[in-house]
Image (tube, rainbow, N blue to C red):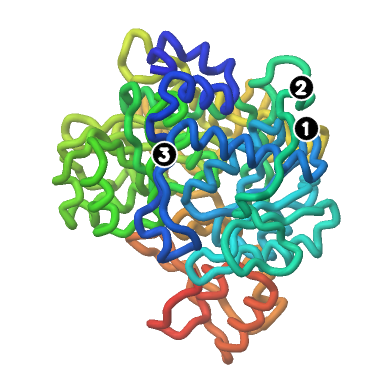
Amino acid sequence: MIVGKSDGAEAAHAATLDELFRRAGVRHPQAIALIDPPNRESFTDGAPRALSYAEADRLISDFAARLRNLGLRTDSVVAIQLPNTVEAVIALMGVSRAGMIAALLPLLWRQQDIVAALRGTGAKAIVTCARAGTLAPAKSAVLAAAELFPIRHICGFGRELPDGVMPLDDRNAQTSVDLGHTPARPGVAANHVAVLTFDITSHAVVPLARNHAQLVAGGLAPFLEADLAQEAVLLSTIPPASFAGLALGVVPWLLCGGTLALHHGCDPMALAAQCAALAEPTVILPGPALAPLSDADLFNVSIKSILALWRAPERLASCAPCHAKAALVDVAAFGEIGLLASQRRADGLPAPIPCGPIGVPRGTAGAVAVAETARHKTGTLALSGPMVPAQPFPPGAAQSNEHAPDPAGFVDTGFGCRRDGDAFTITGPPVGITAVGGYRFGRPALEAQLAAVDPAATILAIPDSAIGERLAGAAADPQAVLAALQARGANPLFSGAFRPRGEAGAA
């Protein structure tokens, strides 16, 4: 194994993402590293690919050289907005190899969200694609770049890219930069910022910076709790566009030096077919999908383990028992601040969240410390530990109080909690936040955007068993509101709230 379980965790903390990838590639250059969704052509351009470590290594170096050829310097911020395909991983690793910082944008974000997120980060480039389902991310990137002065380059995968977008599928492009002469960062490489992800508060989009060591710390929790073996096969339905997406998919893949297969969306039949085609995979999926996928007999195929991501961890308290044959690990994500992983109990119910220090694997003598919990004075859960971001971005910038560590190093997650003996129970989401699947919205911000196009229109969050909540809008002229929000570059989950019932959404 690339890290020898608990006894190798400290060594992993000192490595960058690129160093972890190179270690795996040196050990098994011809082993399969990355696998595209088999149905890739149904939602984006290009045929599905399976890449060996040697092939992926060449593509990563090529991508890093392209960034350098654009004149981008060390620590430049490069935004990435891609579907869950091999290009998303290649781009992330290429930015890392070039010594730059990847700003990860969720796929459904359009002009409005992109501008709000990247304003103030100094991002110099956006990497995107021509088509993602019915969306055209490259067009959104062009519109966003028109409002963001520092962005000078938009690069895209796929066909029929807008004017001004540099194509990345050109296999004949010259990449003459010698990456061996990339200026070295001072100090320990793993302590330099690797990625930006974006947390949503009731009133703002907040960039959170994590270095390589913090990313590895986040990935160690699911890696150790799921007891992933050397060269394990992972099948991830969670895109690498968030801290949870990295910590559940990319980082465990790098730690075990195995295969990362990707799945776009969460289609039961397609996912079952992918599982059956792989050798005892560990499947990474949204927690709310456990029940419907179980009903579809997904778990009757040969699966080693399941990592279930709960972006609304308050739902774990009322979660039904699950007795899948595969080992089940629940991962509670607290926005972009941190996550906690634990195996299901013998009775099929989620394990409680311990008060105080948490080590993984839970209950073992050699557990690695990954987090510490406390109850904030406001009655919300606070986290500290090696995965929790501790600095604003850019350095020296003002940051909202919700994300500032207190003197003891704890960051308030905003999730309500109560203490039951030696454990915490999450009781509710942060105030002012609506969560639709993997997307969070600040309700005051939604209402302000809506008031700008129709002061009489209303937007409501309605409970939904599958995705937590869904947005429903009411207006005298819903079609006019829909068109106005789309013209302003609003998130399609928001603008789609004004579609007639039964009409397919934009995503």
Inspect the image, locate mark 2, and give the three-letter code of the amino acid beneath it. Arg
Q: Nearer the viewer, mark 2 or mark 3?
A: 2
Inspect the image, locate mark 1, and give the three-letter code of the amino acid beneath it. Thr
- Horizontal relation, residue 352 to residue 408: left or right: left
Across and down, in percent, residue 164 comes to 76, 64
Mark positioned earlier in the residue sequence (1 or 3) = 1
- Horizontal relation, residue 264 to residue 376: left or right: left
Q: CA distance from mark 2 to mark 3?
A: 34 Å
> Furthest residue to the bottom?
476
Q: Could you say whether the residue bearing mark 2 is in a helix, strand or loop?
A: loop
Q: Which residue is disc 3 drawn over?
A: 332
- The answer to the question of whether label 2 and label 1 lie on touching residues, with beta carbons closer than 8 A, is yes
Q: Residues within 10 Å of mark 2 (few under 14, many from 20)?
A: few
* Residue 6 visible (yes or no): yes
Inspect the image, locate mark 3, and give the three-letter code of the amino acid beneath it. Ala
Q: Which residue is disc 1 drawn over?
A: 74
Q: Residues within 10 Å of mark 1 (few under 14, many from 20)?
A: some
